[in-house]
Image: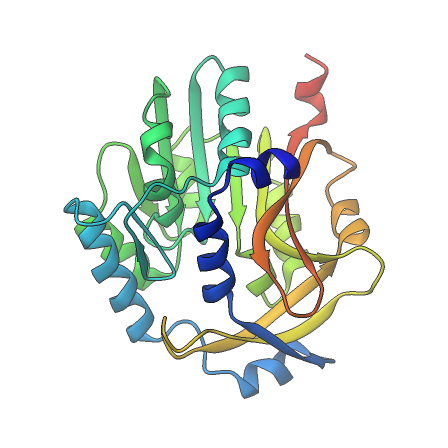
Amino acid sequence: MKYFFNAITPPLFKQLVRRFTGSWQGNYQKWEDAAAEGEGYDTPEILYKVKEALLQVKEGKALFERDSVLFYSENFNYPLLASLLFVANKEKSNLHVVDFGGSLGSTYFQNRKVLREINNISWSVVEQEEFVSCGKEYFEDEKLKFYRTVENCLMHSEAQTLLLSSVIQYIPDPLALIKQLLDKKFKYIIIDRTPFFNDRPDRITLQTVPTCIYKASYPCRIFNKPKFLDHFLNEYDVTFSYESSDVCNLNAVFEGFLLTRKDDNNE
């Protein structure tokens, strides 16, 4: 997958990713220690900038946004699309996604030109209350929905696919979240744009966002990959894995995985 991605990703997009990724510093013993030095990612400014950017996307003035930065040419997330299209193919052109921590639907808008070719698709974003309220007011439609919790989402959606894209590294207790999500028994789990070390332990850092996007810094965990995957492998197989285009100054590698529930693999 990584060779396929490198071959088809325009160089300009790679440069933009590197420019807007930010930087990581520190090696904190506790999440709270890093949080005390950060400025948070739940400030009103962030929501406002993301909303204003996505409104331009909705009005056709830009093609998609990422972290409030507007893009005017098509740059699909090809590895993620490969995972989603694999699921849709297996499910006879049915794709129902729970996008946990999906902002205002940024990933959906980035890839919707391809996704709308799927016969039966729904995209449900689970987010903080302020994002959900904003999403419902400005962006919700027959395909894109917003929910405050996974439980509430599953009451209204037949979702078979969980998407964790650039989110689990920002959760204070990721192991507790993983256990809660595993209890939902999603048929597929896609982990995307997540930083890993292959041979070093987990590390809690402080990630600083470039000021050209917005002023923010917050804790971010870089995972030990084998240890991270062990939480899933009793119930899921790794269908395939790939490298993401994000770059970390601490020599971590951003990766993604499509996980398929073992019971369904045996069907």
Residue 121 falls in image quadrant: top left
Q: Which residue is more in the foreground, 124 or 66?
A: 66
Residue at (77% x, 38% y) in the render: 233
Residue 156 appears in view: no
Residue 53 in picture, x, y percent from top left: 24, 58
Residue 61 in picture, x, y percent from top left: 17, 49
Query: Height in image: 14 above or below 26?
Result: above
Residue at (80% x, 55% y) in the render: 198
Residue 197 falls in image quadrant: bottom right
Residue at (33% x, 70% y) in the render: 46
Residue at (70% x, 61% y) in the render: 252
Q: Which residue is more in the foreground, 122 or 211?
A: 211
Tell me the quarter of the image containing the N terminus. top right
Tell me the quarter of the image containing the C terminus. top right
Q: Left of 110 or right of it: where is 184?
A: right
Residue sitting at the far front: 11
Residue 258 falls in image quadrant: top right
Residue 133 in picture, x, y percent from top left: 25, 57
Q: Left of 193 or right of it: where is 130?
A: left
Q: Left of 98 or right of it: where is 251?
A: right
Query: Height in image: 266 above or below 175?
Result: above
Query: Height in image: 229 above or below 133?
Result: above
Residue 43 in picture, x, y percent from top left: 35, 75
Residue sitting at the far bottom: 37
Q: Which residue is more in the foreground, 184 or 120?
A: 120
